[in-house]
Image: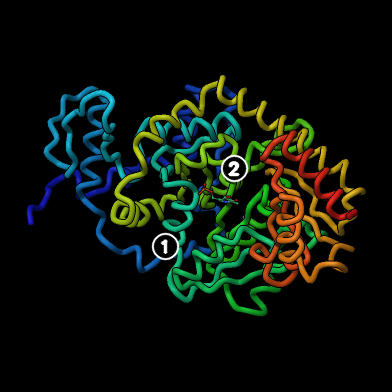
């Protein structure tokens, strides 16, 4: 095998600025708007040393993908590089036929990683080193790689129920023990340090905690102090904190600095943040997301990503550069205003639906409610949902997938469908229940 000497032995993404984070931020601060002022505290502030990356991430990085990344970097910097590196055809096809696109670096293109870092400056006023940004195939791709990087089989990871089912299903598939914490209206369906303590007493030490705010299926959000308490609990217990921020930007709180959601990266530089272009930007089918990684996980993550996925999709990355223009933000905010109107229709209709307890729909586009008296007519929410689809052609999701214990009493409505569809569905549901 030909050994590639020199720079490629060290992953480009590992060549981090040797300056401490605070100093990097100082430099950026001088260059940037003074509003971009908050810098996440670095690992040194933690009470308990961070657990190390997983043993299974100790695989060699796929060197071809690193060289591909370095080639792109050099071309971006204006160098005329002849690449005989990747196994990808470069012949241009005739117009109207296929549009091939080449691999990018395993963690994404440099411009997109920089643009994502810029998004954190714009929305959260926090400096993020682009080297910490890993672009992935949707946030789903980020979960797989982050879980593989951070946890080993047998590790315990906590998450709440009701919750997004893929977290626990991916973790289980990877041999990680899932610790489901039952939550309800008393904690807005979110975890608390007390609930985490109780989980440790019952099941043992946790290797990680996953939170989502706004959450799926409940839509509930964590305030800054609640999120901070959870981040601190993890820091104090050597557990990885994973924050799914896919619904950031879709919230209905009054205007204020935290309206779009508080990012865990504002609070602790060691938090793992996962996000996506799927929800706020509506780009579900482009399959593009990202993770912000703590420095110690960048190289292990890259080793896994370069072997498992080679690179995130190139055309999607190119398109995603447009996500961060003022015009796009304004357009997406208008879409969120539309969600707000659809949400108001549901909240106004709630008394007529005559269901049971509903989660406060702070953000995302979900309304999660117990069915209340409907369960006198239907055995569970699955039977209700089936009957509603057959009898009124309205599709809602029964809660069992989100919560194996209490979800059989609840349903989730997505109001992402927009105002006219939601109005029609509500009419039909009310008529269906009356008949
Ligand atoms: C909470 C949450 N996280 C992650 C995802 C995955 O989204 P994607 O892989 O499209 O980024 C979803 C999709 O519905 C979700 O609801």
Mark 2 lies on residue:
266
What residue is rendered at 48% in x and 52% in y?
Answer: 140
Left or right side of 127 for 299: left
Mark 1 vs mark 2: which is more N-terminal? 1
Which mark, residue 309? none
- Pick the residue in front: 353 or 406: 353
Question: How many numbered marks have been drawn onto this rendered protein structure?
Answer: 2
Q: Nearer the viewer, residue 115 or 425?
A: 425
Task: Work out whether 357 lies above or below 94.
Answer: below
- On-image quarter of the N terminus: bottom left
Determine the residue positioned at 52% across, 22% down.
Answer: 325
Relative depth, front residue between 230 and 348: 348
Q: Secondary structure at mark 2?
A: helix
- Relative to 79, is 302 on the left or the right? right
Q: Residue furthest top?
A: 327
Q: Secondary structure at mark 1?
A: helix
The answer to whether any part of residue 219 appears in the image is no
Rendered view: 194 above or below 29: below
The quarter holding residue 419 reads top right
Residue 262 visible in image: yes
* Vertical position of residue 174 compared to residue 110: above or below: below
Query: Quadrant of the rendered structure where residue 374 is?
Result: bottom right
How packed is label 1: few (under 14 Cα within 10 Å), some, or many (20 or more)?
many
Residue position marked by numbered label 1 in the rendering: 148
Residue 39 x, y percent position in the rendering: 55, 38
Q: Residue at x 42, y 50 (%)?
A: 295
Disc 2, ligand 1: is the CB inside 8 Å?
no
| Residue 229, above or below 428 | below
Q: Position of residue 276 (x, y in %)?
A: 52, 43
């Amino acid at each position: 095998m030909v050994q590639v000497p020199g720079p490629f032995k060290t992953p480009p993404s590992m060549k981090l600025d040797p300056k401490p984070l605070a100093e990097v931020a100082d430099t950026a601060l001088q260059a940037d708007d003074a509003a971009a002022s908050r810098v996440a505290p670095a690992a040194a502030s933690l009470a308990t040393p961070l657990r190390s990356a997983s043993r299974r991430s100790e695989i060699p990085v796929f060197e071809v993908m690193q060289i591909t990344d370095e080639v792109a970097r050099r071309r971006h910097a204006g160098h005329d590089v002849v690449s005989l590196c990747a196994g990808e055809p470069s012949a241009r096809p005739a117009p109207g036929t296929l549009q091939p696109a080449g691999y990018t670096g395993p963690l994404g293109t440099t411009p997109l990683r920089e643009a994502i870092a810029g998004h954190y400056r714009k929305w959260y006023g926090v400096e993020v080193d682009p080297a910490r940004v890993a672009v992935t195939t949707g946030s789903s791709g980020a979960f797989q790689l982050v879980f593989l990087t951070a946890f080993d089989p047998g590790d315990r990871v906590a998450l709440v129920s009701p919750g997004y089912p893929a977290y626990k299903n991916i973790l289980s598939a990877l041999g990680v023990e899932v610790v489901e914490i039952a939550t309800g209206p008393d904690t807005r369906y979110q975890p608390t340090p007390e609930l985490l303590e109780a989980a440790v007493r019952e099941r043992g030490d946790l290797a990680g905690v996953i939170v989502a705010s706004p959450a799926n299926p409940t839509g509930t959000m964590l305030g800054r102090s609640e999120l901070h308490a959870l981040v601190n609990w993890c820091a104090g217990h050597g557990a990885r904190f994973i924050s799914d921020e896919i619904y950031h930007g879709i919230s209905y709180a009054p205007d204020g600095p935290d309206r779009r959601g508080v990012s865990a990266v504002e609070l602790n530089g060691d938090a793992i943040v996962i996000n996506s272009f799927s929800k706020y930007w509506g780009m579900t089918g482009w399959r593009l997301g990202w993770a912000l990684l703590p420095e110690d996980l960048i190289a292990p993550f890259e080793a896994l990503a370069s072997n498992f996925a080679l690179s995130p999709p190139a055309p999607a990355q190119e398109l995603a550069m447009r996500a961060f223009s003022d015009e796009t933000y304004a357009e997406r905010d208008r879409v969120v205003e539309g969600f707000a109107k659809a949400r108001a229709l549901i909240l106004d209709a709630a008394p007529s639906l005559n269901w049971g307890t509903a989660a406060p729909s702070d953000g995302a586009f979900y309304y999660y409610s117990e069915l209340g008296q409907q369960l006198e007519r239907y055995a569970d929410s699955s039977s209700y949902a089936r009957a509603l689809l057959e009898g009124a052609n309205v599709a809602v999701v029964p809660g069992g997938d989100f919560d194996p214990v209490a979800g059989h009493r609840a349903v989730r409505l997505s109001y992402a469908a927009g105002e006219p569809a939601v109005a029609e569905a509500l009419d039909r549901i009310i008529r269906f229940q009356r008949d």
